[in-house]
Amino acid sequence: MNRERRMAALFVLGSLCFVVGPFPGYARLVGAQADAWTFFVGSLFFTGGGLAQALIAHPERRTAPAGPGAWHAAAVQLAGTLFFNITTYRAVHTALTNTSYDRVVWRPDAFGSTCFLISGVIAYRSSPRSGPGAWEPAVNLLGCVLFGIAAIAGYVVPASGSDLDLAAANVTTVLGAACFLACAAATLRTGRTRKSPRLLRLRADIERERRRLTPAARAVGRRPPSRS
């Protein structure tokens, strides 16, 4: 399993936790404490995936054209996952210490969501618009936007102590996590991702070499072997 697949496996596990956790049926089945742990464990998987992505991007951080953008996106995203660690841990602590605490879903932290959104924009702007996996940056950015909406919808109104729109927070959390899951699952299957500047650089080098070949050389490369 290459580095990209290991990174993807962590993002798949984290995304699954955030897809399953908001469902009311799941919370009723496992209880508030287990539901809180689901989000916290998912945030740890996200941090593991974010760290793996940063380690992949760091050696290529000065390599144009994809390296700087990939590194900045990875670094900001990693910071966002750490904010989610703090938020979800607080939710676990609340569930363990307050038996009347029965919320279905813990809203994504506003700082974490902001980091995810910035990371998604950077990754989208710095990624090529064609070739294998060209859809990934757009879907990833959509997931970041949905997490941002969840953070706004899950805001607790100080005057009443109620959520602004808990149902919207639940739905957008699930949909955002599903976007991340789709990207991670594709990387896990193929071993390739637009998040890896190393693979983008190698693909660009191969494309440049291909273009350097003359039409005659390409024809020779396609010629079937002689049967003599």
Image (cartoon, grey):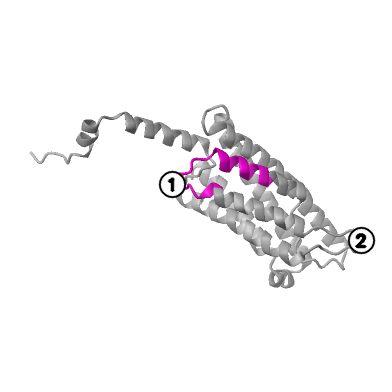
Query: Looking at numbered disc 2 in the image, what kind of residue is underneath it?
Result: Ala
On screen, residue 122 versus residue 104, left or right, reads: left
Residue pictured at 67% horizontal, 46% vertical: 116
Residue 165 percent coordinates (x, y): 77, 64
Residue pictured at 58% horizontal, 56% vertical: 179
On residue 159, which mark appears? 2
Which residue is situated farthest in the right direction here? 159
Residue pictured at 47% horizontal, 45% vertical: 192
Q: Is residue 185 above or below residue 165?
A: above
Displayed quadrant of residue 95: bottom right
On residue 192, which mark appears? none
Residue 177 percent coordinates (x, y): 63, 57
Please give the count of numbered marks on the rendered protein: 2
Residue pictured at 78% horizontal, 48% vertical: 86
Q: Nearer the viewer, residue 165 or 1?
A: 165
Q: Is residue 122 magenta?
A: yes
The secondary structure type at the circle numbered 1 is: loop
Q: Earlier in the sequence, mark 2 or mark 1?
A: 1
On screen, residue 18 versus residue 225, left or right, reads: right
Asked if residue 107 shows in the view, the reply is: no
Q: Is residue 160 above or below residue 206?
A: below
Q: Residues within 10 Å of mark 2 (few under 14, many from 20)?
A: few
**Badge nearest the viewer, 2 or 1:** 2
Residue under numbered circle 1: 132
Asked if residue 168 shows in the view, the reply is: yes
Q: Give the magenta-colored segment's residue range.
A: 116-137
Quarter that holds the C terminus? top left
Q: Is residue 83 magenta?
A: no
Query: Looking at numbered disc 1 in the image, what kind of residue is underneath it?
Result: Pro
Residue 28 percent coordinates (x, y): 74, 72
Displayed quadrant of residue 171: bottom right
Real-space CA distance between mark 2 and mark 1, rounded to the nearest whole angstrom: 50 Å
